[in-house]
């Protein structure tokens, strides 16, 4: 296990926060991977004192790493409440990074990213990494969120993706010109320009399983699907 101390917290949207930690030694990870976070919690509930989090920052972020999560509007789990109350310098323990929700080595493969809500975090890590190394890849990102305020990281994502960022809002403001509704596998499938593209799916577990099943039914090989689900989210 690696020790890390809280450096600062950034509010990304209502009830969505990024926690930046300074590890005791540099974390070796690939953009898109996750860690297990262990946090001291007084009187922990049945969900315990550890959680999986995708690292939402790029490996190139000097001296720090971040995790980004949604907090419950009312009192949440004992773990999330302890996380909310952390002060600068408070310590957590983390595992080594793991997971294969990462870019393919072949940088010529077209990529389609699907993000549901907080499932945007691995893509933020990946896009931040690509910006840092100044590497351009063929990527389309379909980003489903409840409302425009919850489109976190939008400016940074837009700076890389340009017109290949497609926000889809459940609830949109008046005169909103973008797409309103929900992520839809058929619409995305019809928009594919290359059947050999890799499709990445990140979000709540129910969403990820549903989309994976529907893409396979539409003829996409399971070898072309890369999935990463977030337990505990609906």
Image (spheres, rainbow, N blue to C red):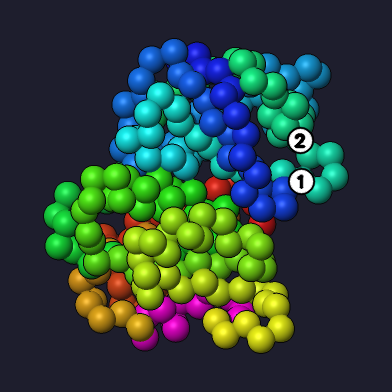
How far is disc 1 from disc 2 in space, using C-alphas?
8 Å
Q: Earlier in the sequence, mark 1 or mark 2?
A: 1
The residue indicated by pointer 1 is 72
Tell me the tag on residue 187.
none
Residue drawn where x is 37% and y is 40% of the image: 58
List x then y, in percent, for residue 67.
53, 37
The residue indicated by pointer 2 is 77
- Is 204 inside the magenta-drawn segment? no
Residue drawn where x is 66% and y is 86% of the image: 175
Q: Are marks 1 and 2 in contact (CB under 8 Å)?
A: yes
Q: Quadrant of residue 191?
A: bottom left
- Left or right position of 36 against 76: left
> Under tag 2, what secondary structure?
loop
Q: Look at the picture and state if 117 lies above or below 87.
A: below
Q: Quadrant of residue 75?
A: top right
Q: Quadrant of residue 113?
A: bottom left
> Under tag 1, what secondary structure?
loop
Q: Is residue 51 visible?
A: no
- Left or right position of 129 against 22: left
Q: Of circles 1 and 2, which is in front?
A: 1
Q: Nearer the viewer, residue 195 or 145?
A: 145
Q: Which residues are magenta?
A: 179-190
Q: Nearer the viewer, residue 63 or 216?
A: 63
List x then y, in percent, for residue 14.
72, 52
- Is 186 inside the magenta-drawn segment? yes
């Amino acid at each position: 296990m690696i020790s890390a101390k809280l450096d600062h917290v950034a509010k990304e949207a209502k009830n969505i926060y990024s926690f930046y930690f300074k590890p005791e030694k540099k974390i070796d990870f690939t953009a898109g991977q996750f860690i297990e976070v262990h946090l001291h919690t007084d009187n922990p509930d049945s969900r315990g004192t550890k959680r999986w989090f995708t690292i939402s920052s790029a490996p190139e972020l000097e001296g720090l790493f971040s995790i980004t999560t949604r907090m419950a509007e009312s009192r949440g789990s004992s773990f999330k409440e302890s996380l909310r109350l952390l002060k600068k310098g408070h310590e957590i323990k983390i595992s080594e990074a793991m997971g294969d929700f990462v870019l393919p080595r072949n940088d010529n493969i077209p990529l389609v990213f699907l993000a549901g809500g907080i499932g945007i975090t691995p893509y933020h890590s990946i896009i931040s990494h690509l910006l840092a190394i100044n590497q351009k890849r063929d990527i389309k990102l379909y980003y489903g969120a409840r409302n425009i305020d919850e489109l976190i990281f939008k400016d940074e994502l837009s700076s890389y993706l340009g017109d290949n960022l497609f926000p889809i809002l459940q609830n949109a403001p008046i005169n909103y010109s973008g797409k309103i509704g929900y992520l839809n596998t058929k619409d995305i499938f019809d928009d594919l320009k290359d059947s050999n593209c890799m499709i990445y799916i990140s979000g709540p577990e129910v969403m990820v399983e549903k989309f994976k099943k529907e893409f396979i039914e539409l003829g996409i090989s399971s070898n072309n699907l890369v999935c990463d689900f977030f337990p505990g989210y609906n």
